[in-house]
Image: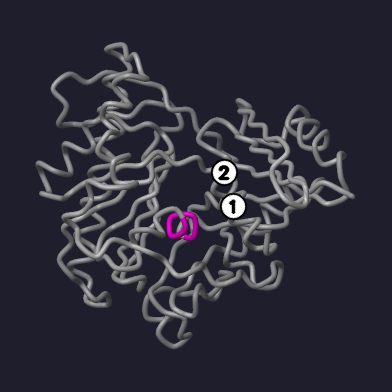
Amino acid sequence: MYLKVFINIIVERSSTTIHVEVHSKTNEVSHYEHVFQSTKLTEEIYEYITSHISESPYYYISFLDTSHEQGALPSCDKNKLSQYQDLSTTEYRCINKSWTTYTSKTDLYELEKKYEDIGIDFIFSPFVVLTKFFKDKIDKNLAMFVLIEDSSLSLAVFENSELLFAEHLDMEVDLESENMALDDLEDEKDFELELDDEGIVLDDMDVDDELEDFSDIEDLDSLEDIDEFSEGKDLEEELYENEVRENTTETPESDDSHFNEDYQRFSLIQNAFNHFYKDTRYESKFIENIYIADNTHVSNDLKRYLEEEMFLNTYIRTVDLGAEICELAKEELGL
């Protein structure tokens, strides 16, 4: 008799995206998405959310963790976890009885307080989003997988569904001048990067006391041979450059902005590789392939850097984070 309403919240550098899906018992009835130019729970955002949840007593609010103090570890054994991270001030959750996501209790409290007027049902880790999004690749391949958001990267190395390494890295942003300069650029130009001090932080799969257990992510199907990447969904990665070229008209200023940000993303990925290879706590293995879930429309420079400077086979897919989070919420509810 009642519809189910899914509200999915993504707080970015200077904006908040609300993705809404309305479902009947058997299928999707409608969906909406709106971007608000604020990272706070403004009256406008509050009214938009409540206007949708008033349609049904069955509504579910999900949030993507954007915490600075979050990550994933390649074990669920509490004794082994302490070798990687001090988890005494964090909430953490075991995923697939194999690896762990975590976030700080302080960030959880701040998020709960910020959204106390509407409540939050699910908080999803970007690492879980990444695993779900690349389920066709993770099962039978050794590769690095990266989720790119506008102000952070979540990176993970998987081999046959086993997590070997993970790291969550923030983009460097000058909050005072909102400028970022890179020393090795030939022509440096300032560009604004708006970032709200109160960007909220929280990890999804780590809220043991608040959320129900996340059901095991389904077995992942993948291609056995890396040479077959020209077929199926991999065509999307191969055509990514054409898609960007056709759908964006960039001014010289925006070109410089892309170059600056994508060079920094390249540097962060390079540093993550160095960490993975040199830190003896991790089972280091040589990586030839990198898969990127892109939520920002990165320029082709990033792909070029990774291929020419690090000799990585680079595949990029555009990701709709609102839709991906909604899928995880539905899976959590067994729908």
Name the secondary structure under disc 1.
helix
Indicate the position of residue 146 as horizontal and vertical percent values: 34, 51
Does the magenta portion include 44?
A: no
Q: Which residues are magenta?
A: 128-132
Q: Position of residue 189 (x, y in %)?
A: 27, 18
Q: Which residue is mark 2?
A: 323
**Mark 1 crowd level (few <14, some 14–19, many ≥20, 10 Å Cα):** some
Q: Amino acid at mark 1?
A: Glu
Q: Quadrant of the rendered structure where residue 174 is? A: top left
Q: Work out which quarter of the rendered image holds the C terminus and state it.
A: bottom right
Q: Residue at x 47, y 58 (%)?
A: 132
Q: How is the image coloured?
A: one colour
* Residue at x 54%, y 63% (from the top left corner): 103
Q: Say whether residue 218 is left or right of residue 170.
A: right
Residue contact at pointers 2 and 1, CB within 8 angstroms? yes
- State the residue in front, 119 or 82: 119
The majority secondary structure of the magenta stretch comes to: helix
Q: Nearer the viewer, residue 183 or 239?
A: 239
Q: Amino acid at mark 2?
A: Ala
Residue 250 against residue 157 in the figure, above or below: above
Q: Secondary structure at mark 2?
A: helix
Question: Which residue appears at 58% of the width and 42% of the height?
Answer: 10
The residue that mark 1 highlights is: 327
Q: Is residue 106 left or right of residue 314?
A: right
Q: Quadrant of residue 272?
A: bottom left
Callout count: 2
Question: Which of the numbered marks, if any, corresponds to residue 24?
Answer: none
